[in-house]
Image (cartoon, rainbow, N blue to C red):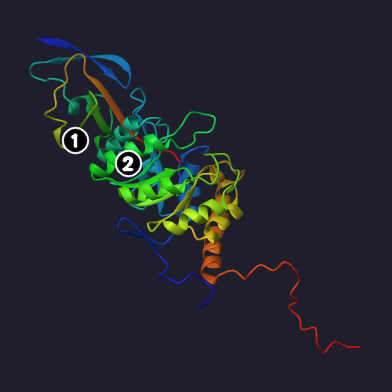
Amino acid sequence: MDGSIASDDNWTVAGHSFRSRLIVGTGRYKDLEETGAAIAASGAEIVTVAVRRVNVNDPKAPMLQDYVDPKKYTYLPNTAGCFTAKDAVRTLRLAREAGGWNLVKLEVLGPPPLLYPDMQGTFEAAEALIKDGFQVMVYCADDPLAAKRLEDMGCVAIMPLGAPIGSGLGLQNPAMLTMIMQQVKVPFLVDAGVGTASDAAIAMELGCTAVLLNSAIAHAKNPVLMAQAMKHAVQAGRLAYLAGRMPRHMGADPSSPLTGLIR
Amino acid sequence: MSSEVTLTLNGESRAFTCSAESPLTVQSLVVLLGLDPRKVAVERNEEIVPRSRYAETRLTSGDALEIVHFIGGG
């Protein structure tokens, strides 16, 4: 091996195979040019997108598709801003009609300021969507029972938060994430909370399948540079996970022999 | 003879003129608004209107329409 990640280290969700283990959001950028440049720099193959009303008074306004080509990137429609199961299901049915995709990101949120996942609403929406033929990647609480239930229902990826959406606090719950991961068989992603490259690397070192983030890139002072940093961090974390870290010692264990010293 | 159709379009009341020869349909509305039908999705009274049915779906006063597209999001 030459130090690069083996070319067959792909991951698969609902039958779709991807090489990049970084999924990025397309929101909160200064403009659509910056969105396109940062996403290209991130190396991501999947991008999350929101569904919103068209401004019927400005039909010629530039559109996301003009800067982030849906033929090049897999659009993953989300339900951001949905606080009920009904709104989430409506939103994704519209998304499917607009783009033809069945692979979606479900999030049903509680109120600000935390926007914490509303698991009751999430269960209801997931059930309706799966029945309707959607492949549901689900944003959820770091709750092992909820994660198991969502997997049993047929969700195709389990995506708990590392910290609240847009907080940039980093992974506050690595032990719980690891415990949930050990019992989940479908892809497991950290979605929300990543603030900088080391946070993404930690998620991957823990053994996550991939990482989903948006604000950490979009709100960096230089989003395009941070997108590159995230790309490398995810790859580094993945390699470290595959390599298997050394055991921790409570004490020194010298790397140089203690014998043969000059006297 | 022309008549007026008043719709709730993305939450706002809007009136459109139409006639028996050219009734207001989802197709004609999307064209009238200057939108690219390939980049939007339409819901009429909380029911999805498939793109294949835009031309045959007539709109009448009181209909509530949502026309959406993709924007940046996380």
Q: Is residue A87 left or right of residue A37?
A: left
Q: Residue furthest right?
A: A263
Which of pointers 1 and 2 indicates the residue nearer the eye?
A: 2
Q: Which residue is denoted by mark 2 in the rendering?
A: A126
Residue A230 position within the rendered picture, expressed as x and y whole percent measured from the top left: 55, 54
Q: Quadrant of the N terminus of chain B?
A: top left
SS at badge 1: loop
Q: Is residue A128 left or right of A252 when viewed as pictured? A: left
User: Is residue A114 among what the camera can see?
Assistant: yes
Q: Quadrant of the C terminus of chain B?
A: top left
Who's the residue at 55% across and 49% down the image?
A224
Query: Mark 2 falls within which chain?
Result: A
Circle number at residue A130: none
Specify few, some or many for label 1: CA neighbours under 10 Å numbering under 14, 14-19, or 20 or more.
some
Identify residue type, mark 2. Answer: Ala
Seen in the picture, residue A237 relative to A258 is either above or below; the reply is above
Q: Is residue B20 left or right of residue A174?
A: left
Give the letter of the chain under mark 1: B
Instruction: Kindly identify the amino acid type of the residue bearing the numbered disc 1.
Output: Pro
Q: At x 37% / y 30%, what residue is drawn?
A: A84
Which one is in front, A64 or A244?
A244
Residue A232 versus residue A95 in the image, above or below = below
Q: Position of residue B2 (x, y in %)?
A: 13, 11
Q: Are marks 1 and 2 in contact (CB under 8 Å)?
A: no
Q: Which residue is mark 1?
A: B50
Picture residue at 19% right of the left edge, 35% below the top: B50
Image: A123 above or below A229: above
Distance between the alpha carbons at the discs numbered 1 and 2: 22 Å
Q: Position of residue A189 (x, y in %)?
A: 45, 52
* Place of residue A53 in the rendered image (x, y in percent of width and height, measured from the top left): 35, 28
